Amino acid sequence: MLIVEPKFKPELDTKFLPASLWNREFRRLVDECVGKRMVTLQVTRPDQTSYERTEMILPDEEKFRELNWRFCERLVKSLLWIWGGSRIRIAGAPEIMERLKACYSPGGERAFDAEFMGMSVFREPFEVSSNLLVSGNDQESPSSVSRVRGGCRIGFDLGGSDRKCAALIDGEVVFSEEVAWDPYFQTDPNYHLEGIADSLERAARHLPRVDAIGGSAAGVYIDNEPRLGSLFRGVAKKDFEAKVRPVFHELQKKWGGIPFVVANDGDVTALAGAISLGRNRVLGLSFGTSEAAGYVDRSGRITGWLNELAFVPVDYRKIAPTDEWSGDRGCGVQYLSQQGVGRLLPETGIPVKEGTSLPDRLVRVQECMEKGDDRAAAVYRTLGVYLGYSVAHYADFYDIEKLIMVGRVTSGEGGQVMQAHAEKVLETEFPQLARKISISMPDEKMKRHGQAVAAASLPVVEGVLL
């Protein structure tokens, strides 16, 4: 067992075991060990693009096997959900490869991940092998896009409790609105389709013409198709395939075939931050119904990575909270979202009626926060510690200079408390990262409508420049 002693323990969750500290301690042990060996991991996609990672691990000895397994298994899990792929290739540790095969097989611990990444997202059977691609380390998807702003555009953002839409002329917002809806667990796909179409029509009334439409929504989007998304979790699989998956292609036809691009809401969060700040190397985190994330690289592009940090492990304790969807433990969604707030609320002693929804639990905490209730502040202090350690973990995969915090959880004074505690964790535990990464939050209007405005910039219109 590794001995990991965080200098900051979340006051409402003192057993939290940060992935960033565990990995740091593991690597320290490896550095001091005679007989360490190199392992190469690749996550690849059907088009043969791949993400390659080389690490040193401990010798293949009985006393080290569980440590090596914990490190490699959690690393593979993180790479799958950050980069995205349907094949795991591993060389240098045959015993790890065999365990991964079993883990990602039907009935294995990661059967959900294998089915999701295989048939649901990349539409091929999931595979684990030792056959490395010679051309590895591409680390970019061909779907990389740049941002543009000219012309008459509509941008929309589909959230779990509302849908936002904006109309822009040459980058200037001429209309923006937020419409409440309740897409979760709606079984009729027409509910979603009609709602999206309604928002587009309402925005179009404020434009002389529509040159392009860009959208932002939770879930995995490839080739403008939702391969899986929490917004549509109530729709039966056959209806999802028949009506939901082609919805944005059908809308594009309805609007005369104009450029129409839909991206993951986390990517658009990062894009919104990059646009507002005039910065690149931006990681955007949206603390909403789930944890959404996106990244703008050094060239100012969103890269086509999945960036599904909700499913990336940030807590390595064996009995960490379980994600209700994937069944895995310690994933970000249980720490940096409304689900995290809802999980912590009983620990505060703040009374709440049984059966209260997660959005209403958040409202209850925020109301108490406005009244100066320290029990509510404890929730945000805890979230801030989670965030500080998690940012250090994310920096193991992303080159980050700016972290943007958005989403309903960050609204009000609570967001400032989160930010302050995250910065304190970084300054104390990871001073090199603290000198490199700055954390900020946009104003309330940008938090609520910035994604819709940024989404409008996604499509490229012929003859229109940045």
Image (cartoon, grey):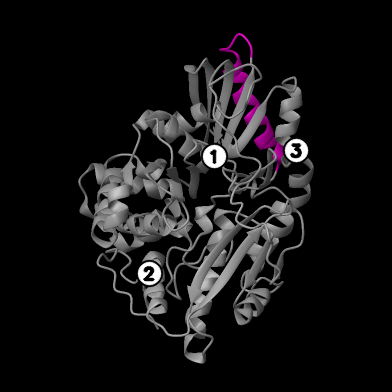
Kindly identify which numbered label has been placed on residue 79.
none
Mark 1 near mark 3, Cβ–Cβ under 8 Å?
no
Q: Residue furthest top?
A: 208
Tell me the residue that label 2 is attached to: 24
Q: Main secondary structure of the magenta part?
A: helix
Q: Which mark is residue 302?
A: 1
- Name the residue at the bottom extreme: 62
Q: Which mark is residue 246?
A: 3
User: Foreground residue, 208 or 402?
Assistant: 402
Q: CA distance from mark 1 to mark 3?
A: 23 Å
The disc, 3 or 2, on the residue closer to the chain's N-terminal end is 2
CA neighbours of label 1 inside 10 A, class few (<14), some (14 to 19), many (20+): many
C-alpha gap between disc 3 and disc 2: 44 Å
Q: Residue drawn at (75%, 19%), measured in percent from left and top? A: 256
Q: Quadrant of residue 386?
A: bottom left
Whole-percent x and y of residue 297? Answer: 49, 42
Q: Amino acid at mark 2?
A: Arg
